[in-house]
Image (cartoon, helix red, strand yellow):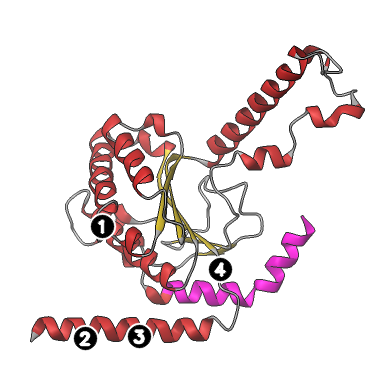
Amino acid sequence: MSSRRTAFFAYFLAFLRKCVFMVLSRGPIPSHIGFIMDGNRRFAKKNKLMEGAGHRVGFSALMSMLKYCYEFRVKYVTVYAFSIDNFKRRPEEVQAVMDLLQEKIEGLTKQESLVNQYGVKVRFVGNLQLLSQPVRLAAERAMVATADNSKAVLTICFAYTSTDEIFHAVRESCEERKEELSALESTGSGPYGLLGLNSNDRGHEEHFINLKDIEKHMYVTPDPDIIVRTAGETRLSNFLLWQSSSTLLYSPLVLWPEIRFRHLIWAIIDFQRNYLYLKGKLKQQ
C-alpha cells in the first residue's frame, strides 16, 4: 500500500509540473540554462554532516534540476562542477570529489539513467588532463555511450575556468589558421610568406583569426539564457564569462542541495519578464 501511495504521489507531482509547463509555455522558454552549484560544503556544515556528504546531496539536487529542465524541454544544460582553482583545496577533499564524480559518471551510462530516459548527450569540458586517469576514462566512456543521444545536451564543466576556455579557443584558432597558411605556402598559393603577415596587410584580413574563429573553438555553445547561482551569490566566478553578456543571472538564497522546483520556476518567470530587454541587448552586440 505504501509503495502504491508513493507511486501515486510521484505521478501527481509530475502532472502538476506538466500543468505548470503548459502555463509557462505561453511565454518564451529558455533553451540553455547554466548552474553554478554553490553551497555544498556549507550545507554539510549547517546540517552537521560528514565531510563530502554535502556533495552527495548536491548531486541528488542536480538530478532533480536536470529532470525538471528536460520536462520543460530545455535543450541545453551546463553545470559548473569543479573549477581549476578547486584543486588548491585540501587533497583529501579533492580526492573525495573525484571519487564521487567517478561513481556518478558510471551511473550516467546505465540504461535506466536519466540521460538515457530523456535522450541526453553528455559532454565533459575543461582541462581534462588535470583529472586522474580513472576519472578521465570514465568521462570519455560516458561521452561515447551517449554520443547518439540528440534530444538534449548536458555539458559538465570540470577542471574548468572561463579564462582557460578563452585561452584554449584562441590557441586552437591560431593553430588552425597557421596550418591553413602553411598549406597555402606549400602549394605556392600564399600571397605572402607566413612571417610577412602583419597588421599593415589590410587587404588580407582573412589570414587573421576573427571572432567567429574563436567562438568555433569555445567549449560551451550556445550562449546561456539563464545562469542560476545558489547561496545568494551574484558572482560568476570565472564561469562562461565569454558567453554571458546577455544572460539573466538568478541568485536564490538557498544552498545548492536545497534548490527546489519552485526556484527553477521563478528563474524562468524572471527570464520571461526580462525577455525583450535581454534580446534587445543581444541584437546590439
Residue 73 picture location, percent across and down: 48, 70
Q: Are marks 1 and 4 in contact (CB under 8 Å)?
A: no
Q: Is 52 in front, or is 197?
A: 197
Identify which amino acid the numbered label 3 is placed on: Phe
Along the polypeptide, which appears first: circle 2 or circle 3? 2
Of circles 2 and 4, which is in front? 2
Identify which amino acid the numbered label 1 is placed on: Gln
Measured Cα–Cα span from mark 4 to mark 3 = 21 Å
Residue 267 in the magenta stretch? The answer is yes
The residue at which mark 2 appears reads as 8
Q: Residues within 10 Å of mark 1 (few under 14, many from 20)?
A: few
Label of residue 16 in the image: none
Measured Cα–Cα span from mark 3 to mark 1 = 24 Å
Along the polypeptide, which appears first: circle 4 or circle 3? 3
Residue extending farthest to the left is 1
Of circles 2 and 1, which is in front? 1
Is residue 209 shown left or right of residue 135? right
The residue at which mark 3 appears reads as 15
User: Which span is picked out in magenta?
Assistant: 263-285
Along the polypeptide, which appears first: circle 3 or circle 1? 3
In this view, 20 is above or below 264: below
Label of residue 30 in the image: 4
Q: Residue at x 62, y 77 (%)?
A: 273
